[in-house]
Amino acid sequence: MENILVLNGHEYYPHSKGRLNDALFQTIVEMLRPQHCVKTSVLQEGFDVKEEQEKVLWADTIIYQTPVYNYSVPALFKKYIDMTHEYGVYFSGNAEEYGIGGGKLTDKKYMLSTTWNAPAHVFENPDLFFEGKSVDDILFHIHLSHKYAGLIPLETFACFNVKKNPDVTGYINNLRMHLKEQLNLI
């Protein structure tokens, strides 16, 4: 039985109340609980840095459910990363080559589960808005923070067009399939 931390990184705004991210977060937790030990964090409810670090150290896998605001994670989620990714806890900084080999979380995996207002077709097309970049390219800085700590990425999950043309049932079904593939769920 694997230890899994599921984190809801949504930050409330009147135009972004978080219902979809909460539904996806709840889906992840409900799917994992029968087969795994699960702990959760909902950043909007507040968090204690040391407690969150202990959860990460306990976890084999961390799953982040988050919207993407202005091509990054919400400010509260970024603050969480800035406060918890601490020298001596997640990394040593003593690597010969910057960023390589100093991570202390090398036995752990992480997965980003994201919601985007952008439609899927604008990614990975050099002629459109993101200039050929993928979801992971846009979130590269988040991946680097985790790479520096030594974590191993699982495949990112993304929901697109969540405000203009939402398909909540489709998102949840796709998330279920993604989790089954990434975590070898039965």
Image (cartoon, rainbow, N blue to C red):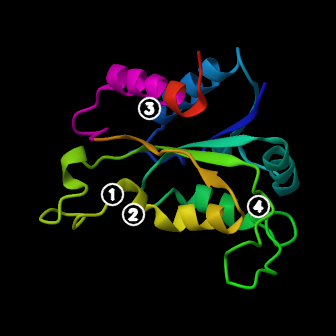
Of tags 3 and 4, which is closer to the observer?
Answer: 4
Alpha carbon separation for disc pair 2 and 4:
23 Å
Q: Which residue is mark 1?
A: 134
Number of labels in the image equals 4
Label 2 CA crowd tier, 10 Å (few <14, some 14–19, many 20+): some
Earlier residue among tags 2 and 4:
4
Alpha carbon separation for disc pair 3 and 1:
22 Å
Q: Position of residue 177 (x, y in %)?
A: 45, 24
Q: Nearer the viewer, residue 100 or 64?
A: 100
61 shown above or below 84: above
Q: Is residue 101 left or right of residue 23?
A: right
Residue 84's label in the rendered image is: 4
Earlier residue among tags 1 and 4:
4
Label 1 CA crowd tier, 10 Å (few <14, some 14–19, many 20+): some
Mark 3 element type: helix
- The quadrant in which residue 131 appears is bottom left
Q: Which residues, given as a range, are shown in magenta?
A: 161-179
Of tags 2 and 4, which is closer to the observer?
Answer: 2
* SS assignment for the magenta stretch, majority: helix
